Image: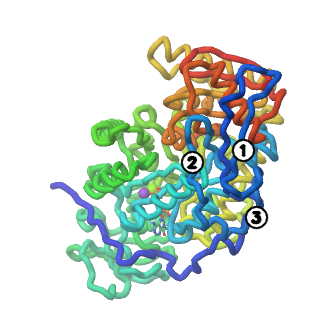
Amino acid sequence: MSQSLHFFTPSNLTFSKQSLPKPSCNRRFPVTTLSPKLISIKASTSADPNSSTTPPQVLISDNGTGAGEILSSTPQDYDTPPSQSFLSDSSSIDVDAVTEVELKENGFRSTRRTKLVCTIGPATCGFEELQALAVGGMNVARINMCHGTREWHKRVIERVRRLNEEKGFAVAIMMDTEGSEIHMGDLGGASSAKAEDGEIWTFSVRAFDLPRPERTINVNYDGFAEDVKVGDELLVDGGMVRFEVIEKIGPDVKCRCTDPGLMLPRANLTFWRDGSLVRERNAMLPTISSKDWLDIDFGIAEGVDFIAISFVKSAEVINHLKSYIAARSRDSDIAVIAKIESIDSLRNLEEIIQASDGAMVARGDLGAQIPLEQVPSAQQKIVQICRQLNKPVIVASQLLESMIEYPTPTRAEVADVSEAVRQRADALMLSGESAMGQYPDKALAVLRSVSVRIEKWWREEKRYEAMELPAVGSSFSDSISEEICSSAAKMANNLGVDALFVYTKTGHMASLLSRCRPDCPIFAFTSTKSVRRRLNLQWGLIPFRVSFSDDMESNLNKTFSLLKARGMIKSGDLVIAVSDMLQSIQVMNVP
Ligand SMILES: Nc1ncnc2c1ncn2[C@@H]1O[C@H](COP(=O)(O)OP(=O)(O)O)[C@@H](O)[C@H]1O
Ligand SMILES: C=C(OP(=O)(O)O)C(=O)O
Ligand SMILES: [K+]
Ligand SMILES: [Mg+2]
């Protein structure tokens, strides 16, 4: 018998936690120093780029503000679109003002290496709130298709695009599928339901009439009543609320609450028997549901940068999706991220990661499928395998959970974030903290400051353990690129260089350098906007969009003059440059 899941149509657009005050980004962090005002720079064609005595002349145009410097502004200024859209012609370089100021003021050694992903929800979906997150360091905006309608997500995507176009950011978009998990319905529009100790609740696949009868929960999995047994333990949200199954009446399952708590709409459900997770026929549900395929079509049509697949069980599903995307999207540069959140995904870990373009340690559901005390070692292992296979890895869920309600994190949360940074994960992710919490900007600021502090400590103490990095490519040319990158990274550490420069068309060479986790930042120059956005997920990379040729000499001169003119590098800085057009390593001082 084939099993199916029902997909509930959200009954309104504001979803859970509707009672929360809608945070306004001005309320807490009126950003006054980092104005994303744009300055476009053109190297004058009359200058001789090869002459070291007469530096190339640079014209600074400031869109009519009259001053070629970053101006402070009030948040309201963000609303005003610049008179001229962001220029990305052949003689300019694309970088956002936040990165620019960071490089200028702090020097590039102090830049943050760990990337930050924010889930966008009702608390952060407006243009101003999105902008506050971008200014606060968001590298990737995640939309979770479990919640909201496609129209809602489309509007978020449009706003992020506008932010990138108007303000020079390269915020990438990650679409996360719902997946075939068993979950509750949306509570008929209520923001939550409270279960008290000893209460009897009915879980059923029957759709209830509105208003929802008291103590009833709709379940999306057809086989639910057949698969559970009297005596099973039913866990809501991985154990936030617990029930014991006491009776089955047709499609209805009566349960007694044993651990009281608040249930949120569409919360995940698992059932346990004799201390183990029960995976009856629900384990046979397709990883990508019919609703997921529609969402994937939506993601392809919208040109998202990443698609994250929930509850991946095997490499086949990833391969299937990748060929589906390749057949449907013209330039097929949507990266597929495998979410590691089930027992099956742990069993087939290496082959899943190998097939994917990156992975997510999705600790929320993972912690509902394996004992909680096993989650930290699973995380460490996933992070390690990803780095060995050269795939970006995101550590997700509950990093700063208490900040959904409180303005400061717990000490334990800070220690957890530190550990993920210490493991050198590519990225950290906020979920509820940024989607529906009261302090999204503060939560992001905590991730930012903890990352920078731990990274600095590790560099200073040279505390990283050497990791064996096996060959990842198959051709001789791949081996040359890998050797060049590991040698360049080693030289950079030994010589104490200021930055590594990489000229990369597809981004591959940049990711090989990132994999080495060098002490200095990596300036990744690429000619397309989509590669620039995708590189924004990877550890240590500062992606710039600039057009370049096969002539490294002229590429270097051009970038030096553009970056010098903006104060992002200065004469005398020591740089190592590599490129995927010319397999060489160049060490030089900026003229
Ligand atoms: N697009 C959205 N619309 C409404 N609420 C959302 C949205 N995205 C996320 N949320 C809220 O933020 C919470 C945390 O997000 P996330 O961890 O991505 O989802 P989940 O809790 O379903 O795993 C969700 O439970 C939901 O309450
Ligand atoms: C990131 C996760 O997935 P989602 O939020 O979609 O459940 C998770 O389970 O940790
Ligand atoms: K999801
Ligand atoms: Mg999950």
Q: What SS does tag 2 mark?
A: loop
Which circle's residue, 3 or 1, is located before the other in the chain?
Answer: 3
Where does label 2 land, which residue?
170
User: Between marks 2 and 1, how big is the CA–CA gap?
Assistant: 22 Å
- Looking at the picture, does residue 83 appear above or below residue 545? below
Query: Where does residue 93 sit, x and y in percent of width and height?
Result: 62, 39
State the image quarter where residue 56 is shown.
top right
Where does label 3 land, which residue?
32
Query: Where does residue 195 sit, x and y in percent of width and height?
Result: 46, 80
Q: What SS does tag 1 mark?
A: strand
Question: Is 88 on the left-hand or right-hand side of 565?
Answer: left
Nearer to the camera, 85 or 455: 85
- The kind of residue tagged 2 is Ala
- Looking at the picture, does residue 389 appear above or below residue 335? above
Nearer to the camera, 65 or 556: 65
- Disc 2, disc 1: CB below 8 Å? no
State the image quarter where residue 270 is shown.
bottom left
Question: Is 305 on the left-hand or right-hand side of 450?
Answer: left
- The kind of residue tagged 3 is Thr
Query: Where does residue 458 sit, x and y in percent of width and height?
Result: 77, 38
Q: What SS does tag 3 mark?
A: loop
Q: Residue at x 66, y 16 (%)?
A: 585
| Dot 3 beta carbon under 8 Å from ligand 1 | no
State the image quarter where residue 486 is shown.
top right
Which circle's residue, 3 or 2, is located before the other in the chain?
Answer: 3
Q: Residue at x 69, y 64 (%)?
A: 442
Query: Where does residue 374 sit, x and y in percent of width and height?
Result: 55, 48
User: Which quadrant would the C terminus be assigned to in this image?
Assistant: top right
Where does label 1 land, which residue?
60
Which circle's residue, 2 or 1, is located before the other in the chain?
Answer: 1
